[in-house]
Image (cartoon, grey):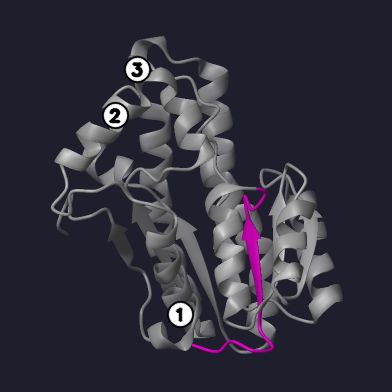
Amino acid sequence: MSMEGKVAVITGAARGLGAAFAQELSGMGMAVVVCDVRDCDETAAAVKKSGGKALSSKVDVTSAESAQVMAAAAVKAFGRIDVLVNNAAMYGNLHNGRFTDLDEQEWDACMAVNVKGLWQCAKACVPSMREQGGGSVINISSLAAIFGMPNALHYATSKGAVIGFTRALARELGRDNIRVNAIAPSMVWTPGTREIMGNQVDRFAEVVRNGQTLRRNLETDDLVGTVAYLAGDMSKFVTGQTIMVDGGTVYL
């Protein structure tokens, strides 16, 4: 699984899953560009402390200009982009409720980050992949889209769009030897999860756990292997797929 000399761009990498993905891909030998609307210096420092190469870059994924600046910085620092992990998303800071009560501005912001953000980052990073003859785009969807997450229609809808985006872009980029896949995890115990669930987090954890074939909650370490698989050559003939990492909640 060595990926020496290759470069991964990871959005939403200031904490949680994005930071864990950076550590995993760095451990495979990749240089990582860690991006977020928040400061990513801590994530980059942790990668470097482990012996890896990292660049911290601020990015607003909803902005074409910001995404282009981020991609240019990645190429300037490391010469190429091989993998894009579209992980940035509105989640922990969303307000849940009945669909009639959701805030319209928050709905629009959720779609802008969770859907438009993928498009902007792909537009920025794919040209480098084309130049070197291939690459891998990994989009983070959610069980919420497949199962249907109640009281979070904005989030579930946005993550359903991620799957459609993945399938269409995979067909478009196949001629360039660029693979596009999605991962749909169940609830992961990140800071964002604890924020969105508040004082109901333990009850929600029990409900999720009891709906799975594997009766434990998903941890960050359970997900990084799937990202590593899709980033590397072991998945070189896999594209347009959505891989469920949900403990057997749904079977596709």
Question: How many marks are shown on the rendered structure?
Answer: 3
Between 15 and 242, the residue placed more toward the observer is 15
Q: CA distance from mark 3 to mark 1?
A: 37 Å
Would you place residue 53 above or below residue 67 in this image?
A: below
Seen at 75% across and 61% down, the residue is 44
Amino acid type at image mark 3: Phe
Mark nearer the N terminus (2 vs 1):
1
| Disc number lying in front (3 or 1) | 3
Which of the labelled discs sits on residue 61, or is there none? none
Q: Position of residue 122 (x, y in %)?
A: 61, 62
Give the residue number, with chain letter if any, for mark 1: 174
Q: Which residue is mark 3?
A: 99
Percent of width and height locating residue 109: 58, 30
What range is drawn magenta here?
Answer: 1-14
- Near-viewer residue (168 or 247): 247
Magenta stretch holds residue 122: no
Q: CA distance from mark 2 to mark 1?
A: 40 Å
Q: Which residue is mark 2?
A: 204
